[in-house]
Image (tube, rainbow, N blue to C red):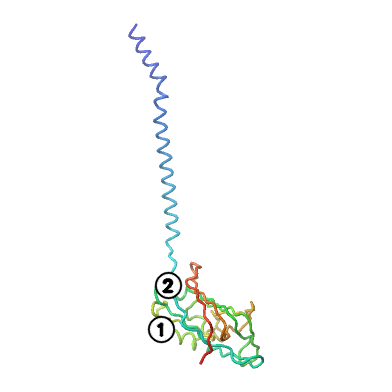
Amino acid sequence: MKEWGSLRHRNLYFLKSSPEGLSPVVGSLLLLLIVFVLVGAIASSINLSGCRTNFQYPMARLTLESCEGGIYGAGSTETVRFEENQIILMHEGGDPLPLDSVSIRIYGYGKSYQGIPGHGGSPLSGELSVFYRDLGSGGKNSTCYVVHNRATLEDGLWDVGERLVLCGQDSAVGAVESSVKVGVDGDYNTSDNYGFKAGTEITLKVIDSKGRNVIAERKAFVKLAD
């Protein structure tokens, strides 16, 4: 009977003390569960950010070698020879730039035209905004843009050591929709040709159309063509 009482006492003690003994174990398990959840969340965020950063912005060192053209005369005799307005850019290092995903914007004071030059219409003077939607040959003037950039256009890439020549008559003519758009003081009802005034400053931006980031921004003063 004494042994039975002792055994019952030990069982009662075990039952009373077991919740207290289990508390550290349960706490440890909960802590491990929280750690696993946090590790999983961190790993997921790293994977997601990794997916977002898989796209690498192209980087290239571009220089503006020259900007020539200009507006001749003054007042009512002021004229512009669009074909003489040329901007030459040089790719000096970095990534090859796909011509179909790179655009160019140019800002400065100059002239464009409404209508067809020599066949009626009128010139427009003011702040020019020139937009090359892409640098491929589509929607460009074959006798200006394509002729000047034949080597660069050959493989669809603007690569290191290659020049890109922009001309005031790069816009497509005839029934082909031009990929060069020109506005004067916000008016884009133009023939998409352009000429900048000599002695004024232009700003040129080369833009990655996919990543929507500026690859290069350059400024230059327009020199009168020889």
User: Which residue type does callout 1 highlight?
Assistant: Ala
The residue depicted at 39 percent of the width and 25 percent of the height is: 21
Q: Which residue is mark 1?
A: 151
Tell me the mark number nearer the camera, choosing from 2 and 1: 2
The residue depicted at 45 percent of the width and 78 percent of the height is: 63
Crowd around label 1: few <14 · some 14–19 · many ≥20 (10 Å): some
Q: CA distance from mark 2 to mark 1?
A: 19 Å
Query: With respect to residue 10, does 98 lie above or below?
Result: below
Q: Quadrant of residue 39?
A: top left
Image spot of residue 158 (x, y percent)? 42, 77
On screen, residue 70 versus residue 147, left or right, reads: right
Q: Looking at the image, tell me whether mark 2 or mark 1 is earlier in sequence order.
A: 2
User: Which residue type does callout 2 highlight?
Assistant: Ala
Query: With respect to residue 42, does 98 lie above or below?
Result: below
User: Which type of secondary structure does the marked residue at label 2 adopt?
Assistant: strand
Q: Quadrant of residue 13?
A: top left
Judge by depth and name the residue closer to the eye, 55 or 80. 80
The residue depicted at 41 percent of the width and 31 percent of the height is: 26
User: Which type of secondary structure does the marked residue at label 1 adopt?
Assistant: helix
The residue depicted at 58 percent of the width and 89 percent of the height is: 71
Q: Residue furthest top?
A: 1
On screen, residue 127 versus residue 101, left or right, reads: right
Image spot of residue 224 (x, y percent)? 54, 89
Disc number placed over residue 60 in the picture, else none: 2
Crowd around label 2: few <14 · some 14–19 · many ≥20 (10 Å): some
